[in-house]
Amino acid sequence: MTLPTDGADAASIAAALQAYREDDAPTTGGRVLAYVYDSGIADLEAVGNAALTAFSGVNALDPTVFPSVARIENDLVGWGLDLLAGGPAAVGVVTSGGTESCMLAVKAAREQWRADHPDSPRRPTVIMPITAHSAFVKATELLDVDRVMLPVDPTTFQVRTSDVAAALDEAGSDAALVVLSAPSYAHGVIDPIEDIAPIAAERGVPVHVDACIGGWILPFLSQLGYQVPPFDFRVPGVRSMSVDLHKYAYAPKGTSLLLFSDPEYRLNSYFAYSDWPGYPVVNTTLQSTKSAGPMAAAWAVCRRIGLDGYRELVLATRRATDAIIAAVDEIDGLRVLGQPASTLIALAADGPDGVDPFLLADAMSARGWFIQAQPGVAGLPRTAHLTVQATTLGGIDEFCEALRSAAAEAAQQPWAAADPQLEAAAMALDPSTLDLATVDALLKFAGLDAGESPGLPAEAAGIQALLEALPTQLRDTLLAGYFSAIFQPSREPAGDS
């Protein structure tokens, strides 16, 4: 299609956008246990969207022109620091999401390292477990920083304190940052932050705690009497933390907080430049021009819910989590990995003949529930991921019954495995020389044709197994190629008018 010559009316625009949404997963109702966060509060979406609209045209680039930006940001950062035990000198910044927060955390550590080692010809190193979010891998690549990836304990799925200490010793003066999770996305467990951060501090290496998904829920769990290990600024050595407001603060996407122990360290994440003929530029985030709408929406949602409201939401979410864990304990062939610290659950097979998580995800999808398949890598088992929400509690009986039924169905089937012909064809390819045409042909052969409505087939376990079986570089190349096929411009054919 091409842009119409005449402008469209508001009603037809709304109808067209609604038509685009027809194939989307629902963002409310609690049936999608990944990507979305639904509080169940009836007017919350309207409150957030009203603020989003009111501030959509406000440019958060320059708080001297738009002072409301600083007022909103200072409130949000202050609320986050209150929850996460920030000291009197602690500060922060509002970003567009967890990835930007993670990238700026790595930038702050890199700049601090460079200042501490002005004459070093070497590159700084970030030390992290393999369960750290991929945003940190992206950050090391974009910021030209080395990284050391550590294994995790196969029972607890936490990084071992001894492994981090050994990595710090090995890196020596090159060590610039240790990244730990509270909790990790894949398995929902908290790394031993209280043990590791002081060790890093003794060596002068800052620790960043990625609490993007747990930072707005763990403090309330602690207040409600649940056992939460120390993970925030109370732990010596924790210099920065990330916490996403568009997750369990239930704000519209996308808003995150990046919090720092002190303003000197935060300054390393800023960008300032005045050696050009234009206006002096100071960027507190990776973006320059940015709408103040998302931060205003987060502010409005936080004010609408309040501390008591968050305690109620967290309690409901944790009760739903506990109910799912109890249900899994009674399902033959299925188990919960590790000890879920908050409201994330990873389901795996219990024993060699247990339930295949890939088949379980397909069976749940057929029953109207989305849970997320996660491949087995680095010797860790394949799993199905659940992000439990406040609205999950309202349908918990239905969900658990669906889980029992889906597990029973999956248990009757052989484990999903890669098609031998497909795997052989893929393994014969050299990912360093692959072109998009070859990638596209292989994906279509595998049943992944992006077409006009991208998405995995209803029975995706075989594709998940194929991806799991491939070497990392080849897998990543194919995944990038699939997304390249999805995002193709809508263009009018030549000669049409």
Image: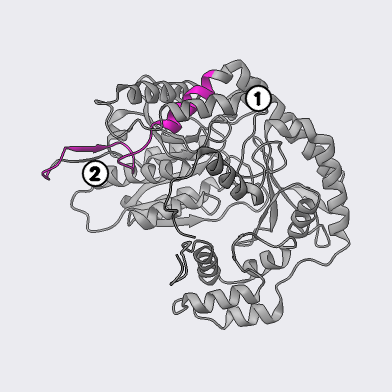
Rendering coords of residue 361 (x, y %): 74, 54
Check if mark 2's residue and mark 1's residue have beta carbons within 8 Å. no
Q: Secondary structure at mark 1?
A: loop
Give, as a three-letter code, the residue at label 1: Ile
Looking at the image, which is closer to me, 316 or 362? Answer: 362
**Residue 349 appears anywhere in the view:** no
* Residue beneath disc 1: 41
Region rendered in magenta:
275-303
Decide: is 98 above or below 122: above
**Residue 16 appears anywhere in the view:** yes
* Residue beneath disc 2: 116
Decide: is 411 above or below 463: above
Look at the image and name its color scheme: one colour
Mark 2 or 1: in front is 1
Left or right: where does residue 97 sit relative to residue 145?
right
Q: Secondary structure at mark 2?
A: helix
Looking at the image, which is closer to me, 24 or 473? Answer: 24
Give, as a three-letter code, the residue at label 2: Asp
Rendering coords of residue 427 (x, y %): 59, 79
Disc 2 and disc 1: Cα gap in Å? 49 Å
- Residue 299 falls inside the magenta stretch: yes
